[in-house]
Amino acid sequence: MKVERSVEAYETYSRTWISRGEADTARLAGYFAALAQPGTVIALDGDLGAGKTKFSQGFAAALGVRGIVNSPTFTLIKEYEGRLPLYHMDVYRITQDEAEDLGLDEYFEGRGVSLVEWASIIPDLLPAGRLNLHIEHAGGEGRLVTCEGIGAPYAAWVENLPEPGVLE
Ligand SMILES: Nc1ncnc2c1ncn2[C@@H]1O[C@H](COP(=O)(O)OP(=O)(O)OP(=O)(O)O)[C@@H](O)[C@H]1O
Ligand SMILES: [Mg+2]
């Protein structure tokens, strides 16, 4: 018999983190990129211009991806090679119904790391265990990043996340 685990069964750890500028967002991305492993899924959300793509670019650089990482808004999914493969997705222009046919599970369960911009558009297609990052404007170059780690190892990643001034 298949045992379904409910989301409630996952340990969750949540906290807010203040980015004081682009460089902080890149450091945050670097922290998570260093921890990434095959099958890591990071769901990014937040307003237009919040910094989702900036985070993705910092993440890609820290993962050792060479070359330019752009927003894949029109291509939906772009693949890169770094220490691990990187699957960079942006589902802004599609609906959850349309996304069902993309076979995203293949990416989420693949050997690489999935970064999904506008992930809240496809809640039912995301794996239960994941890192949710929600970025909001907080005046000028300030950004409030709500980090939510759901399940292992993500909850511990968030629990151990250093404060902005400490993170290099
Ligand atoms: N603390 C910060 N972190 C990230 N980006 C910042 C920060 N402060 C200013 N910025 C600027 O905000 C913009 C973020 O743009 P970005 O394309 O990353 O947003 P996005 O969330 O991907 O938007 P979209 O939903 O339109 O794709 C960039 O121009 C960046 O230079
Ligand atoms: Mg973007």
Image (tube, rainbow, N blue to C red):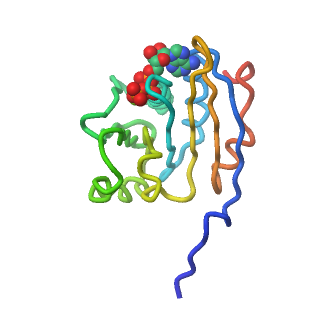
* Residue 79, quarter of picture: top left
Q: Point out residue 149 in the picture as x, y percentages from the top left corner.
A: 64, 48
Q: Point out residue 85 in the picture as x, y percentages from the top left corner.
A: 39, 43
Q: Residue at x 61, y 32 (%)?
A: 31
Q: Residue at x 42, y 58 (%)?
A: 125
Position of the C terminus by quadrant: top right
From what the image shows, is residue 64 above or below residue 86? above
Q: Residue at x 50, y 58 (%)?
A: 127
Q: Residue at x 71, y 58 (%)?
A: 11
Q: Point out residue 55 in the picture as x, y percentages from the top left corner.
A: 50, 28
Q: Residue furthest top?
A: 140
* Residue 103, quarter of picture: bottom left
Going by the image, does 34 lie left or right of 66?
right
Going by the image, does 21 lie left or right of 47?
right
Total labels: the figure holds 0
Q: Is residue 101 visible?
A: yes
From what the image shows, is residue 100 above or below residue 94? below
Q: Residue furthest bottom?
A: 1
Q: Is residue 113 visible?
A: no
From what the image shows, is residue 123 above or below residue 28? below
* Residue 160, quarter of picture: top right
Going by the image, does 42 lie left or right of 88?
right
Q: Point out residue 5 in the picture as x, y percentages from the top left corner.
A: 60, 72
